[in-house]
């Protein structure tokens, strides 16, 4: 048997100054769906997430909480692990940047960059004095032309306040990497997605890159720069390196490193695309390491039309949504409602609409009415089919083709289109039930009824297997109702070859997708 192909997918690591909110849950959810999809499709997946625990922002948050940074990060990092439990993430590793393995990897990449030369034959890292603007909230340096002045203060485009910083600092010679980066984007058209972000990055790099300050001396919460007492690494150098740490760097000969590096996908939000698509590949090339294959930047969520922020008091807490609507319902909503890559708005009305229309009325109803009839009219077993009509063959073909359609969309991170393709089959399934009206055939043509129900059971089997990455619990319930064992749920079981054998006993069906009744409407309905 040939070895399974590796697939390495990462989320950004989360700053531990804030409690997790829906934006954090979103990035990791998208990776989780990808990871589950690729595993079911036969890949050997490594899915990484974790927490970004160094830097001035975290140091300030710890001090505001009256704690030392280490115990503070121990405490807050746990919230992100708990988020993983809540959201059902299937990550293979959870990295914390305060772990010894990560300090070691960060120092090793620094040394590798320092030992190498830039494309213009100069040292990649040099010591200088930095004088410029820094926004702690973004942990980012800004040029004066990027800032806006208000009430005597300077603000970054993100809204974060920037302060003037002056200190000795090591610099990374980013300016020398400009042409190499542009060539890399040109040679690798899939390196950045979606296309709008790719264009944005290319024009940023074309506009001219400045060298980057990569060490700080005015505070101490970070990874020490090797051989330079008093300097700690700029938090982004250390943070980006987490993707290497987790696959065993600096041991580049290790099995895990050879298997998983280079990363297939760094999933990020649109705010941090520059770090991942400009600085990170430059750092990697400077250290003699192959850059990642792809970065995909998704959009941002607003809440009922408003920017989400702690000060506005409108932070959406994932645990509250899961408790109110259900986990799979939330997972489905987040990936279906908004084209992945664009900004989106969370609203309770939209959430309820998706639950009641797509899930309860369309998918749930199809499964429920078919399995109930099988249970009642076919002795609770997979029916025996006879000759197929062209309508039967046409819907079976759609079911057999669905994996290919979804695979194309998932591999370019168009989750919404993958789900749309699935819902086209669900709609076709419901139309087929209506047209064939199997319940009317019980007396007149029981054989034909059995064939129609057999076709529908097969359609549901395909839908159930393919729904697993997005809605693992509900899909699992559907597959339980078809009596499928664990080893019958992979994508290798799709298609005609593994069609259900007639006669297989089926458990009693139960509804999978409940309707959401809005308070007040329940009372109205009761009169
Ligand atoms: N620590 C850095 C990442 C370092 S990766 C080497 C960081 N952390 S973060 O906690 O601020 O953000 C993590 C992710 O959450 C980012 O991808 C960001 O885009 C995403 N989101 C934060 N708020 C968001 C929304 N309101 N909507 C969607 N995603 C947003 O950046």
Image (cartoon, rainbow, N blue to C red):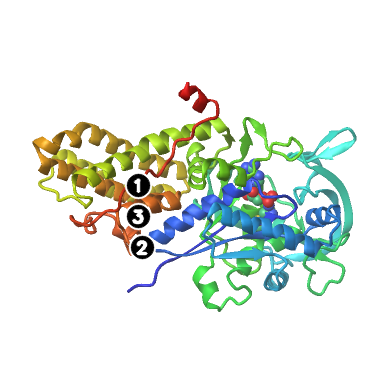
Q: Which is more foreground, mark 2 or mark 1?
A: 2
Q: Residue at x 42, y 33 (%)?
A: 357
Q: Residues within 10 Å of mark 3 (few under 14, many from 20)?
A: some
Mark 2 or 3, which is nearer the eye? Answer: 3
Q: Position of residue 410 (x, y in %)?
A: 43, 49
Confirm or deny contact between disc 2 and disc 1 (CB under 8 A). Answer: no
Residue identified by numbered label 1: 405
Residue in front for this viewpoint, 40 or 372:
372
According to the image, label 3 marks what residue? Answer: 480
Badge 2 or badge 1: first in the primary sequence: 1
Disc 2 Cβ-to-ligand 1 distance below 8 Å: no
Determine the image quadrant of residue 213. bottom right
What residue is shown with label 2?
Answer: 486
Spatial separation of the CA atoms under disc 3 and disc 1: 25 Å
User: CB under 8 Å between callouts 3 and 1?
Assistant: no
Q: Is residue 425 above or below residue 167?
A: above
Q: Nearer the viewer, mark 3 or mark 1?
A: 3
Residue situated furthest front in the rendering:
527
State whether residue 193 appears in this view: yes
CA–CA distance in space, label 2 to label 1? 24 Å
Q: Secondary structure at mark 2?
A: helix
Question: From what the image shows, is residue 94 above or below residue 336?
Answer: below
Of marks 3 and 1, which one's residue comes earlier in the chain? 1
Left/right of residue 391 with respect to residue 365 in the rendered view: left
User: What residue is rendered at 68% in x and 60% in y?
Assistant: 78
Q: Secondary structure at mark 3?
A: helix
The quarter of the displayed image where residue 72 is located? bottom right
Residue ID at (38%, 48%): 406
Decide if residue 205 is in sight here: no
């Amino acid at each position: 048997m040939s070895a399974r192909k590796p697939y390495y997918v990462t989320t950004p690591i989360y700053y531990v100054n804030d409690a997790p909110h829906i934006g954090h849950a979103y990035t990791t959810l998208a990776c989780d769906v990808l990871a589950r999809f690729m595993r079911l499709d036969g890949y050997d997946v490594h899915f990484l997430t974790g927490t970004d625990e160094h830097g001035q922002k975290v140091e300030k948050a710890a001090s505001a909480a009256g704690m030392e940074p280490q115990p503070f990060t121990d405490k807050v990092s746990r919230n992100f692990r708990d988020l993983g439990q809540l959201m059902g993430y299937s990550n293979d590793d959870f990295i914390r940047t305060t772990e010894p393995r990560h300090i070691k990897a960060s120092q090793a990449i620094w040394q590798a960059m320092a030992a190498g030369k830039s494309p213009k034959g100069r040292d990649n890292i040099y010591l200088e004095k930095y004088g410029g603007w820094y926004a702690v909230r973004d942990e980012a340096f800004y040029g004066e032309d990027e800032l806006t002045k208000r009430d005597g203060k300077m603000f970054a485009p993100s809204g974060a306040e920037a302060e003037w910083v002056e200190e000795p600092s090591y610099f990374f010679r980013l300016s020398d990497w400009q042409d190499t980066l542009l060539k890399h984007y040109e040679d690798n058209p899939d390196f950045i997605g979606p296309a709008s972000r790719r264009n944005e990055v290319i024009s940023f790099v074309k506009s001219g890159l400045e060298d980057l300050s990569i060490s700080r001396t005015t505070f101490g919460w970070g990874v020490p720069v090797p051989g330079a007492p008093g300097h700690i690494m700029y938090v982004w150098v250390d943070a980006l390196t987490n993707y290497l740490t987790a696959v065993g760097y600096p041991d580049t000969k290790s099995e895990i490193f050879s298997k998983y590096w280079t990363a297939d996908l760094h999933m990020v939000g649109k705010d941090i695309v520059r770090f991942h698509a400009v600085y990170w590949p430059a750092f990697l090339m400077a250290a003699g390491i192959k850059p990642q294959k792809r970065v995909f930047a998704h959009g941002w969520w607003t809440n009922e039309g408003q920017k989400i922020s702690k000060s506005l008091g409108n932070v959406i807490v994932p645990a509250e949504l899961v408790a109110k609507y259900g986990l799979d319902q939330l997972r489905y909503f987040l990936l279906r409602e908004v084209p992945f890559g664009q900004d989106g708005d969370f609203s309770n009305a939209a959430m309820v609409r998706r639950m009641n229309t797509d899930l309860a009325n369309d998918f749930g109803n199809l499964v429920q009415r078919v399995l109930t009839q099988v249970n009642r009219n076919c002795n609770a077993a997979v029916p025996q089919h006879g000759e197929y009509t062209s309508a039967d063959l046409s819907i079976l073909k759609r079911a057999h083709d669905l994996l290919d359609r979804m695979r194309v969309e998932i591999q370019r991170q168009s989750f919404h289109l993958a789900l749309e393709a699935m819902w086209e089959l669900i709609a076709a399934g419901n139309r087929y039930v209506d047209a064939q009206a199997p319940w009317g055939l019980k007396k007149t043509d029981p054989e034909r009824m059995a064939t129609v129900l057999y076709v529908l059971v097969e359609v549901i089997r395909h839908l159930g297997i393919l729904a697993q990455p997005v809605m693992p619990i509900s899909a699992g319930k559907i597959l339980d109702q078809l009596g499928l064992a664990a080893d019958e749920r992979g994508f290798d079981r799709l298609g005609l070859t593994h069609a259900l054998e007639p006669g297989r006993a089926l458990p009693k069906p139960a509804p999978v997708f409940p309707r959401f009744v809005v308070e007040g409407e329940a009372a109205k309905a009761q009169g």
